Image: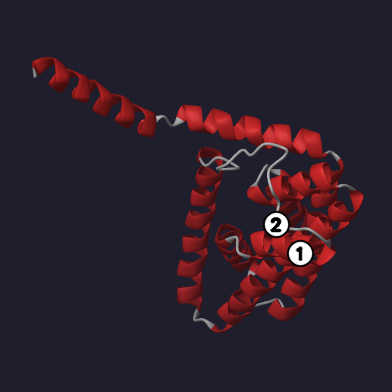
Amino acid sequence: MSAQVWLVFCIACAVLFALPSPISFKVASYSSIRGKKALVAAVMGATSGIVTTVTAASIIVAGAEFLPSAVLYIAQWAGTGWLMLFSLWTIATPAAREANADNDNLRGRNFGSTFSDCFSVASLRLRYFGFFVAFLIQFVNGTRDVVEMVSQMQAVVLLIAFASLTAQAVFAQVTLSSVRRMSTSKKQRNPKRTHFIAGRAVTAGYRRIAA
């Protein structure tokens, strides 16, 4: 691929992993509460989980090379639509549905359990899986060796994810405060549930007065 295409890919991955997310929240929580040993296990587990997700997405993208050009064209446009939906979803959804306190119980008690906990959080992110399927399929054009291309992209994702998660773990307090702040602001901008509860409370009040 050209240097411009690689640049676009690297920037997209860097932005994706730099955004506050449940993965960064989990890694930063382990780093803040459990210390350096947990930091290493958490970063390695989360990075491995992300690479696993990218590998699964790459298998699907590699199979897209055998699709008819018309079907591939439709799949690429559908992928573009998913990427737009992903952007809106990321903006609207709180990064952490439960902005937990620093003394919350974490599942990982040792290196292995911390690794597996962060691995499961990262590898089961279907949103990331959909993102990489939709994103990688944009680079399939029938003129490149898809297997070689996705292998190179996996290596790039590994490096960027590791660097981003390491930075988020090292600056754990900054990461945690950022996730909590963004989650709180997003919940405040979407107060439908609050309005619903308030409406029922007012209705109940009127019924009690009428009775």
Q: Do the numbered discs 1 and 2 sit on residues whose CB atoms are within 8 Å? A: yes
- SS type, badge 2: loop
What residue is rendered at 68% in x and 49% in y?
A: 16
In the picture of the structure, the residue carrying the numbered disc 2 is 107
Observer-nearest residue: 66 or 192?
Answer: 192
How far across and how far down the image is residue 105, in percent?
69, 48
Q: Residue at x 58, y 76 (%)?
A: 60
* Label 1 Cα neighbours within 10 Å, binned few <14 / some 14-19 / many ≥20: some
Residue drawn at the location 65% of the way across and 46% of the way down: 21
Vertical placement of 41 versus 60: above or below?
A: above
Q: Nearer the viewer, residue 50 or 71?
A: 50
Looking at the rendering, in which quadrant would you find the C terminus?
Answer: top left
Which x, y percent locates residue 61?
Answer: 61, 74
Q: How is the image coloured?
A: secondary structure
Please count the marks in the image. 2
Vertical position of residue 21 compared to residue 125: above or below: above
**Where does label 1 land, which residue?**
113
Find the distance from the CA under tag 1 to the CA under tag 2: 7 Å
Residue 20, x across and y down, in percent:
67, 42
Q: Residue at x 74, y 73 (%)?
A: 149
The disc labelled 2 sits on which kind of residue?
Arg
Amino acid type of the residue tagged 1 in the rendering = Ser
Res 200 quadrant in image: top left
Question: Would residue 150 be seen by someone viewing this image from the given angle?
Answer: yes
Quick one: 175 or 56, which is closer to the camera?
175
Tell me, for residue 102, which label it has, or none: none
Judging from the image, what secondary structure is the residue with disc 1 in?
helix
In the rendered image, the residue lying farthest to the left is: 211
- Residue with the most extreme bottom position: 66
Left or right: where 137 falls relative to 107: left
In the image, is residue 178 above or below residue 58?
Answer: above
Residue 15 as seen in the image, left or right of residue 37: left
